[in-house]
Image: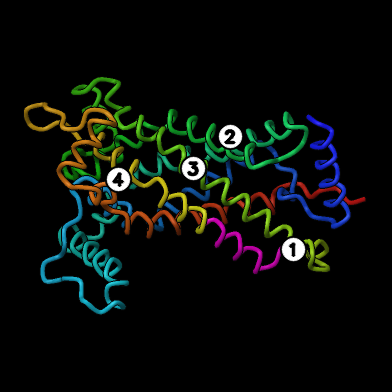
Amino acid sequence: MSMAAMTTATSGDDLRRKKHVPAVIERRVEPWLHFVAGGLGGMIGAVATSPLDVLRTQQQLYGTVTLQGTQPQPNIMVRSVYPLIRTGGFLKEIYLREGIKGWYAGLGPALAGIIPARAIQFFTYGNGKRILTQWNDGRETPLVQLSAAGLAAVVTTTATSPIWMVKTRMQIQRGKYTSSLSCLRSIIQKEGIMGLYKGTSASYLGASESAIQWMIYERLKHFMSLRRSREPGTRKHGKTASDWFEYFGAAASAKLLASLASYPHEVLRTRLRQPPDANGMVKYKGLVHSAKIIYLEEGVRGFYGGLTPHLLRTVPNAAIMFLAYELVIYYFGTAPKTH
């Protein structure tokens, strides 16, 4: 490191001490606490947004279809809310066709995947960030956060891909399988062990979304921390309801921006997990091949099928999950020592 860079870093540290800027992580967190907090948040979010997850999967697989008798109106106000109206219409159709159970198709394997997936993700990210920060001379930079997020995404995807395959098959072939176990056996018998990992390449591509989301969230938390440092008495009284609402909003904003930037991988992953036809033929073979077919048959819009229900599900899901995580960390973490 050059003398100028060392001087700049030292000046930044001095400025931080003078302003008494609190660290982003305000509690000493045991490694296992990341695991528990992530799993709990993932479970709550999944149950709350399951109907939209079912709808998203169907629209990603079959594309978007305009409801009969429901057409966009020329009025700009109507056009702005039309996606929400159409999403509500699709949910109503699922309910009328399959009942309340249709909204929760695949929830069992989803929870079996989401709980360990989020637990692994938060565990890997929290501890990976701590280790990388130590290697970086104690400085938690955006690059450290980005690297930890990428590592967490890869580890989580590799560990839970078979569960997501079972979940997707049960959602798009409802009634064919009596249980998650029967679905698992069917995939292995017909497609082999590697059949459980179809779409994993697209999931690795989606690691960028997780990395972007974490980095934006951490930056927003940092700015919130700077603002709180200027408010007298904040340290004495701990976090307020306003702080928790800000965490909720920061998580929602981070997920929204990350999803918009990387959504096509979601469609590619779902198509790659589509089962073979009656003749055993597979339509989508690999990322590039799938992208070509979607573009030729559906155009650019095909890469954004199910975007509205996806955002309606994942944005509040992420907000709930991250808020639950922060609450567990705050109330069960070890308070920093005061001098």
Circle 2 — which element? helix
Label 2 amino acid?
Ser
Residue that badge 4 annotates:
106
Query: Cα distance, mark 4 to mark 3?
Result: 23 Å
**Nearer the camera: disc 4 or disc 2:** 2
Residue mark closest to the camera, 1 vs 4: 1
Q: Left or right: where does residue 281 sit relative to residue 308? A: left
Dot 3 corresponds to which residue? 210
Circle 4 packing at 10 Å, graded few (<14), some (14-19), many (20+), is many
Magenta stretch encompasses residue 240:
yes
Q: Nearer the viewer, residue 51 or 296?
A: 296
List the residue tagged with mark 1: 228
Q: Earlier in the sequence, mark 1 or mark 3?
A: 3
Gap between marks 2 and 1 measured at Cα: 27 Å
At x 53%, y 35%, the residue is 150
Look at the numbered discs 3 and 2 and tell me whether their residues touch, using CB distance below 8 Å: no
The residue positioned 33% from the left and 44% from the top of the image is 264
Tag 3 or tag 4, which sits nearer the N-term?
4
Amino acid tagged 1: Arg
